Image (spheres, helix red, strand yellow):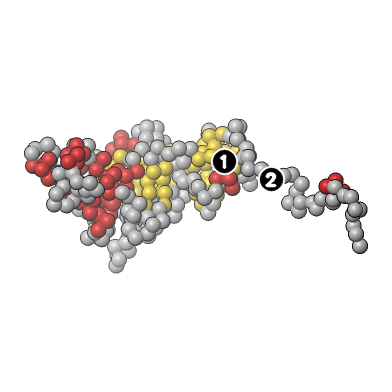
Amino acid sequence: MRRYGKHTDEDDIRQRPNRKGTRPRTTIRPKHEDAVEGMVLTVDRGRLTCLVEDRVVFAMKARELGRKAAVVGDRVSLVGDLSGEKDTLARIVRIGERSSVLRRTADDDDPYERVVVANADQLAVVTALADPEPRPRLIDRCLVAAFDGGLEPFLVLTKSDLAPPEKLLELYGALDIPHVVVNREELYDGGAADRVRAYLDGRVTAFVGHSGVGKTTLVNALVPQDKRRITGHVNAVTGRGRHTTTSALALPLDVVDGWVIDTPGVRSFGLHHVDPSRVIHAFPDLEPGTENCPRACSHDEPDCALDAWVAEGHADPARLYSLRRLLSTRERREGD
């Protein structure tokens, strides 16, 4: 049976309704000009806790951001319910430009890069002098990640009541990296915590370290009002600590102006994402000597111009040794 007449036009044709609605689809996204700025405090299974002015707001990432993920320390723009009340949820519609990024991979062969912290000013590398034993190669890897990501590193050496710090500090003397030596007893009487706070005033500091080195104990001493985690103990057989922090968390300091970001304990710190040519930028006294290096020089080969530069007295040989030790971390096992 013929449904329409012989002379039909488009007005006679019945339009099939759109099952998803009658509004035509568009690629034009809203500008969200009324979005409010906030800071990501922690991320847990797709839900983000943000600080908006003086309120804690729970949010999720807007679909329009695609695969771009927000991490702790990110400055974000939010819309929706920003009251912070129970069972409310806002949306993150923009992620601000990052001034620095701490990144790592699971190992040196893993191409998948993980952003741990954004917009931190410095990286506190926490290591115990004993129980568990120091791991210089892991410290070196953290320093490389800091230099590559635009963070200023400093060392926090814990458990000084169990071993002296001099032997470990000799490895890093030529790098001119600030350091603080503490022990558990000093943390509770306030003296050690005050020495660490002197480096944190007015800055955002990410804390990273091997499990069991006392990193979370240190953070709890710096931010005593945070009681959500219980510190763990070191396994007497393996020398490894139990993970007591499961996700990165930003906390405001209560004595000085600044933030600390506690990160989960690490047992490896892959550097697949790091271009070795960028590490030289952390050595301004050596960088001018690379002008005569051959193209794509790794700065650790026989015809590297840095050898002659240092031999002429332009820089301390210990600095060149330190540079090459850091550059070789990708070829060494972290427990060496």
Please say whether residue 128 is visible from this viewpoint: no
Do the numbered discs 1 and 2 sit on residues whose CB atoms are within 8 Å? no
Q: Earlier in the sequence, mark 1 or mark 2?
A: 2
| Frontmost residue, 278 versus 8 | 8
- Say which residue appears at 8% left-offset and 38% top-offset: 313
In the rendering, at what x and y percent does residue 181 appear? 24, 44
Secondary structure of the residue carrying numbered label 2: loop
| Residue 50 spot, x, y in % from top left | 52, 41
Q: Which residue is mark 2?
A: 25
* x 45%, y 45%: residue: 72
Q: In the picture shown, does residue 96 fall above or below 134?
A: above
Q: Amino acid at mark 2?
A: Arg
Which amino acid, mark 1? Val
Q: Secondary structure at mark 1?
A: strand
Q: Which residue position holds label 1?
A: 93
Residue at the spot 83% in from the left edge and 47% down from the top edge: 10
Furthest toward the bottom, the residue is 237
Identify the disc placed on residue 138: none
